[in-house]
Image (spheres, grey):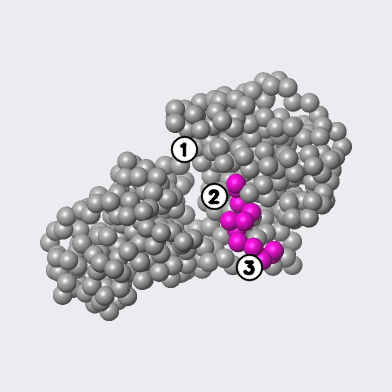
Amino acid sequence: MSTPGRTLILLDVDGVLVHPVGYKTALRALVEHFAGRMGLALPGPTDDEIAVFEACGLTNEWDSGAMCVSALLLTALERAPDARRPTLEATFDALRAAVPAVPRPDFTAEARQIAHHDADGRYPAARYLELLSARTDPANLPLLRTLLGNVYAVRETPTTRTFQTFVLGSERFHATYGLPAEFVSASYLTTHDIPLLDAPTRARLLDWAARPGHGVAIYTARPSRPPADLPPDEPVGEPPAGYPPEAELAAELIGLAGSVPLIGQGRVGWLALRHGRDAADYIKPSPVQALSAIAAAASGAETESLHAAARLSERGELSGPLSALRDGPLHIVICEDSAGGIRAVRGAVDLLQRAGVAASLSAIGVSPQPDKRAALATVADHLVDDVNEGLALVLGDE
């Protein structure tokens, strides 16, 4: 692959740098944890069931976890309605004493009902609460609202708190949210995710990135902390979901923490708060996150790159780290397992070109799975099985 002039590499996380086993394992642990609270020994959702959840639009485990636990709760209360108490905790205690066994709910059937229910811009958990409101005893609704009312408010929702404890580990959970962890756990992202970037390729990548005209950034929709180089007087704000360092855990796992800039959901969410926007307005597939990653790869500066990306996207103004890209040709390489992520980078390159930057793009679609490869083939210039093969196309020319 020819890489003339300045060359920047953007690297997605899930499916590219790491195989994200931790989230699925944490979802299973969450459901089994709450089943145990009710005195039930039922397995959490299988990989096949989780695939159905995702196909039905439950792509966030905060939604699917709350759905599974709510379905379990209602199944148990059908067997022991007298166990219902004013609070969820008291109900769990009463069920543990009253219900010897219950059938495992059909979690996929519940997910399909959510998928067929009018979304109207609402999250899946909110739609599920509406569905259950029409079919359950009204006396159960206060308990269901505790589980499904706002799964994105970590401090209010027990399933979300439990999931985040598994994902982050109890120590990082406390450091992130300022709440005591309800149990001790290691981080499932650290102990279950599988690194896909091998050590020799990582060493070559870092050596390559240290040379003049080269840059690398991690570009991910994973939750993250705010910008690492945020000045002390810059306001941080506090979104309902907080700033869990899930992208940082991936960077630590693959040995890139602190070595390359990271543009994750928390960075982009911080920018959105500053601009009075929702994080979804800026996160990929929006070009704003891609522009931020390009600028950060070129400069190493996260905060300035985020501001420059918003200015170019919203005002057509080339500023900050992006203004330096006018000098000479710019080639961007994106390693992604998502067609939407590649389209976002193409949109960012188009904005740069319209602003006078001589930018080009090589999109490397990364996946061994036939269905994903078929989708990636519509937007990628190259298809590879793994990130090491993809980076060899770039680093092999050096």
Which sits earlier in the primary sequence, circle 3 or circle 2? 2
The residue segment tinted magenta is 273-285
Which sits earlier in the primary sequence, circle 3 or circle 1? 1
Q: Which of the 4 quarters of the picture holds residue 389?
A: top right
* Residue 277 rendering spot, x and y as whole percentages: 64, 63
Residue under the point 55% across and 53% down: 223
Residue under the point 41% across and 52% down: 58
Q: Residue furthest right?
A: 327
Pick the front one: 29 or 340: 340
Magenta span: predominant SS is: loop
Q: Name the residue under label 3.
A: 237
**What label sits on residue 222 in the rendered view?**
2
Residue under the point 29% across and 68% down: 134
Q: Give the residue type at disc 1.
A: His
* In-image side of 71 versus 259 (left or right): left
Q: Give the residue type at disc 2.
A: Arg
Q: Name the residue under label 1.
A: 19
Pick the front one: 289 or 203: 289
Asked whether 275 falls inside the magenta stretch, the response is yes
* Residue 41 rendering spot, x and y as whole percentages: 20, 54
